[in-house]
Amino acid sequence: MTLSSSARSRAAKAGPQGKRAWQSRLLVLTFLLASSTGCDESPIRAAANSAPPAPVAVTVVTLERREIPVTSVLPGRTAPFRAAEVRPQVGGVLRERLFTEGESVAAGQPLFQIDPAPFEAAVRRAEAALTRIEAAERVATSTANRLRALARVQAVSEQNLENAEATLRQAQADVISSRALLETARIDLGYTRVASPIAGRTGRTSVTPGALVTANQATALVTVTQLDPILVDLTQPSAVLLQQRRDVESGALRRPSADRALARLLLEDGSEYPHAGEVQFSEVIVDQGTGSVTLRAVFPNPDQLLLPGMFVRARVEEGVTDRAILVPQRAVLRTPRGEPMAFVVNADGVAEQRVLRASRTVGNDWLVTEGVAAGERVVIEGLQRVRPGTRVQARERGAAPASS
């Protein structure tokens, strides 16, 4: 509130006394104005402070308990089902290679040919020795039979008969030994044709025709690898393995087989392998460096898409549970301590904070075993405006918004 210029000039002409009177009137007017304003606004301000805040609009989803398969994704590497390093079993000069590097071969298919001439000669020598020994055995048999007849009429001494029978038994033993030597010579001759012990695909050869090879040498001539089926070695933390066994024992997890489980592969480029496999067994020793256990799975590989040494991920079906609840991942936040939590709308329309026990993800949801129950409503949208105790206006996911 201000005075006009004429009033201020009159107060100035009146002197100090007039100026003091003007200031007194100004103070009185200011007090009356402040009092009237305070009386008018205090009820409005009090009413505004006592009014409850408007409910926060949120979207919720009602939880339900249902039977779901429990899976885990484990890293692993492929390994050959069988691999055979082909080495010569006899020594000699390599005459020719009977296959093309990289092609598939059958079990027993010839791969290399070693010069057979020395071994063919050894077979002929063994056959001649056997013929000579068999002739000696026939003579010993004839002599023994004749002396037996004479011994019955006491025409010869018992000593002569015993000597004849001993000679016969020695000749028979020589025949058996000679036949074994002949069989060995034939086996060595067969080894000159080096065959594949398994069916599979060949790799690079380490020798060329004309090379001298020795029996059981350190360097393999070629490696044959069986690719169908193929093995996948997976690693699983031992703590997870213990929790699985506890869940199976308590009945929270049902497994069709205690030792085997189905598995699906995810390749390095993110695509899914079309053929399902099976986890056959797990190691009984925990790796001290990583604290993990190795699981071995077998997968069919008819197209030979999987090659040994590839890095893959396997989605292993651990079993089926009917005691868990799926909570959308976007509804789960973290407490300052790092614990998973979610806001639940109670019957009074108030948001409550719940700490969850979430062990794994299933698609876009968390698999929760503690913290929430079936039938409760969890906030999935509008979380940035919700605090514990906030009154909310909940709308079910998928429902049409309420008309104003």
Image: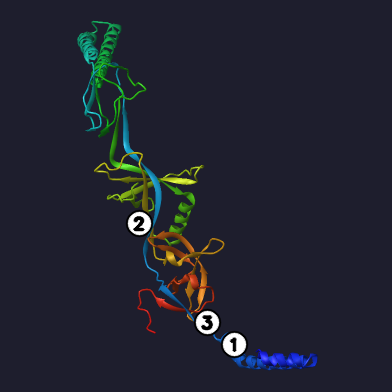
- Nearer-the-camera pick, 57 or 120: 57
- Nearer-the-camera pick, 316 or 129: 316
Q: Mark 3 points at which residue?
A: 53
- Quadrant of the snapshot with the C terminus: bottom left
Helix, strand or loop at label 2? It is loop
N-terminal label among 2 and 1: 1
Helix, strand or loop at label 1? It is helix
Contact between marks 1 and 3 (CB within 8 A): the answer is no
Vertical position of residue 350 compared to residue 96: above or below: below
Residue at the (32%, 34%) spot, across then down: 83
Amino acid type, residue under disc 1 in the picture = Arg
- Nearer-the-camera pick, 85 or 117: 85
Q: Residue furthest right?
A: 17
Q: Mark 2 points at which residue?
A: 256
Task: Name the side, left or right, on which 382 lies relative to 166.
Answer: right
Q: Name the residue under label 1.
A: 45
Helix, strand or loop at label 3? It is loop
Amino acid type, residue under disc 3 in the picture = Pro
Bin the neighbour count of mark 2 within 10 Å (Cα to Cα): few under 14, some 14-19, many 20 and up: few
N-terminal label among 1 and 3: 1
Q: Residue 117 carries which label?
A: none
- Quadrant of the snapshot with the N terminus: bottom right
Amino acid type, residue under disc 2 in the picture = Pro
* In this view, the mark in front (2 or 3): 3
Instruction: Residue 28 in the image: state x and y as whole percent.
Output: 72, 93
Q: From this viewpoint, is residue 361 visible?
A: yes
Vertical position of residue 397 compared to residue 234: above or below: below
Instruction: Residue 370 in the image: state x and y as whole percent.
Output: 48, 66
